[in-house]
């Protein structure tokens, strides 16, 4: 679709009553080219959007949430699927069959290597034939492929925060790939809105905890795409995620070893010189989750420790660059729109 097109693009959001879905609706409402036409939910189907999303303004409050499996509204050209993995796969397949372009936020189409999907999620994939046509939507690295596809697999939040700083260093062969350690932290919205004991207020408040060990499912995704986009080597990315008592935000600290860490700031900064949503801080400065909250930005800081070691820290808003924001960025690229359309908001601070 040419960028000068003026007619609005009718959009559907599947999983509109969840956290990623809510963020999609906020971004779509401000998007100059999108018109929200269809919203779906599971348990909350049958209710008004305004009744289940407390922050929504008047614009779309009266749209009715239809059952997730129901036929999509007529005229829809683009769908975002923000559903649990496994549920998403069948919905996505139905949409693709109808000729609707899809950005899927679940993990179902992120692994061209089916064995990795099965190992990470313990599932047999219900739509394996679609895997080869899906494009992994790490926007800054996959623009050309995204522009050519009908199905984008939006990356996971942890993989986005880790791959953005790591890939330039892998491509430059600058780091020792056997000595990467990643220590990452996420706010509780990363676990979704569906109630579960581990994210109850009393379980997370005043507490910090590691989880997902010995191998969180996002480790498969990071390693598969570090291999695919980082130069083709087999790379181990041991990674420990932590749950932090805050609503949103993700911080990944990477301990890296190599010959000339003084050069790494320049390598990463040069890679993202023209990338509107990746900001490399001045050497020695460190990012914080508060400064990217509400924006589609990834902020990266690099501190050299000694002649062979540096610490690289990246921050994203898990619901925006880690989910809905990157999904809109990918839809913009797929449809030939301005990549920044609907995403120009700065962070919310303080
Ligand atoms: N949260 C994040 O930071 C984040 C980041 C990156 C990717 N993601 C991915 O995005 C997807 C959504 O995550 P989320 O955090 O938004 O989860 P969530 O808050 O739990 O929302 C899930 C949504 O899916 C709907 N749903 C659940 N089961 C369904 C079914 N069987 N049929 C139809 N609809 C169903 C839910 O509707 P009801 O509530 O009405 O049942 C809800 O709207 C997941 O695949 C997740 O891995 C999330």
Image: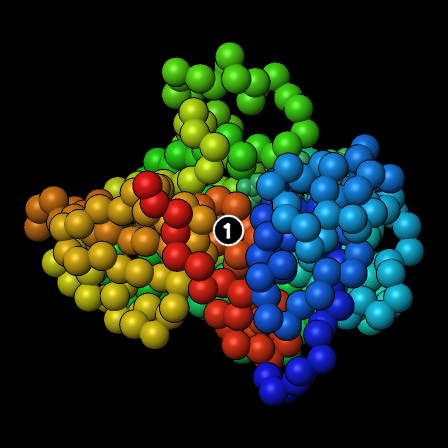
227 to the left or right of 217: left
Question: Which quadrant of the rendered structure holds the C terminus?
Answer: top left
Can you give x and y, in whole percent of width and height, for residue 115 in the image?
Answer: 65, 48
Which residue is at 34% across, 74% downward? 274
For ligand 1, give the image quadrant: top right
Instruction: Please indicate, yes or no, whether residue 115 appears anywhere in the rendered image.
Output: no
Instruction: Please indicate, yes or no, whether residue 64 appears anywhere in the rendered image.
Output: yes
Which residue is at 39% across, 47% downward? 348
The picture quadrant where one finds residue 49 is: top right
142 to the left or right of 85: left
User: Badge 1: few (under 14), some or many (20 or more) residues near its Cα, within 10 Å?
Assistant: many
Q: Nearer the viewer, residue 31 or 99?
A: 31
Which residue is at 61% across, 34% downward? 192
Dot 1: element: helix
The picture quadrant where one finds residue 288 is: top left
Can you give x and y, in whole percent of width and height, for residue 65 in the image?
Answer: 81, 45
Can you give x and y, in whole percent of width and height, for residue 42 in the image?
Answer: 81, 38
Residue that label 1 marks: 320
Number of marks present in the image shown = 1
Look at the numbered disc 1 and say if its residue's Cβ is closer than 8 Å to ligand 1: no
* Relative to 141, residue 219 above or below: above
The picture quadrant where one finds residue 109 is: bottom right
Question: Which quadrant of the rendered structure holds the N terminus?
Answer: bottom right
């Amino acid at each position: 679709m040419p960028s000068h097109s003026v007619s609005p693009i009718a959009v559907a959001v599947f999983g509109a009553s969840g956290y990623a879905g809510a963020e999609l609706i906020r971004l779509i409402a401000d998007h100059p080219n999108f018109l929200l036409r269809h919203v779906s939910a599971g348990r909350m189907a049958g209710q008004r959007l305004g009744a289940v999303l407390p922050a929504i303004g008047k614009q779309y409050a009266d749209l009715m949430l239809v059952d997730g499996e129901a036929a999509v509204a007529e005229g829809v050209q683009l769908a975002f699927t923000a559903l649990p993995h496994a549920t998403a796969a069948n919905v996505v397949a139905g949409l693709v069959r109808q000729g609707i372009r899809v950005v899927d936020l679940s993990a179902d189409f992120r692994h061209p290597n089916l064995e990795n999907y099965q190992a990470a999620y313990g599932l047999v994939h219900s739509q394996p034939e679609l895997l080869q046509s899906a494009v992994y939507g790490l926007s800054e690295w996959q623009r050309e492929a995204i522009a050519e596809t009908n199905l984008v697999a939006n990356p996971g939040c942890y993989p986005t925060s880790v791959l953005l700083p790591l890939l330039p260093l892998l491509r430059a062969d600058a780091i020792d790939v056997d000595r990467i350690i990643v220590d990452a932290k996420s706010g509780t919205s990363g676990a979704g809105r569906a109630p579960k004991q581990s994210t109850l207020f009393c379980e997370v408040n005043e507490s910090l905890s590691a989880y997902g060990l010995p191998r969180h499912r996002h480790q498969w995704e990071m390693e598969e795409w570090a291999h695919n986009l980082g130069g083709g080597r087999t790379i181990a990315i041991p990674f420990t995620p932590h749950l932090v008592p805050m609503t949103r935000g993700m911080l990944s600290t990477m301990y890296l070893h190599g010959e000339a860490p003084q050069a790494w700031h320049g390598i990463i900064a040069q890679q993202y010189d023209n990338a509107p949503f990746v900001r490399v801080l001045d050497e020695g400065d460190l990012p914080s989750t508060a400064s990217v909250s509400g924006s589609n930005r990834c902020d990266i800081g690099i501190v050299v420790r000694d002649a062979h070691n540096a610490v690289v820290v990246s921050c994203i808003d898990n619901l925006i660059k880690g989910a809905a924001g990157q999904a809109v960025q990918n839809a913009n690229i797929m449809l030939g729109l301005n990549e920044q359309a609907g995403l120009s908001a700065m962070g919310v601070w303080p």
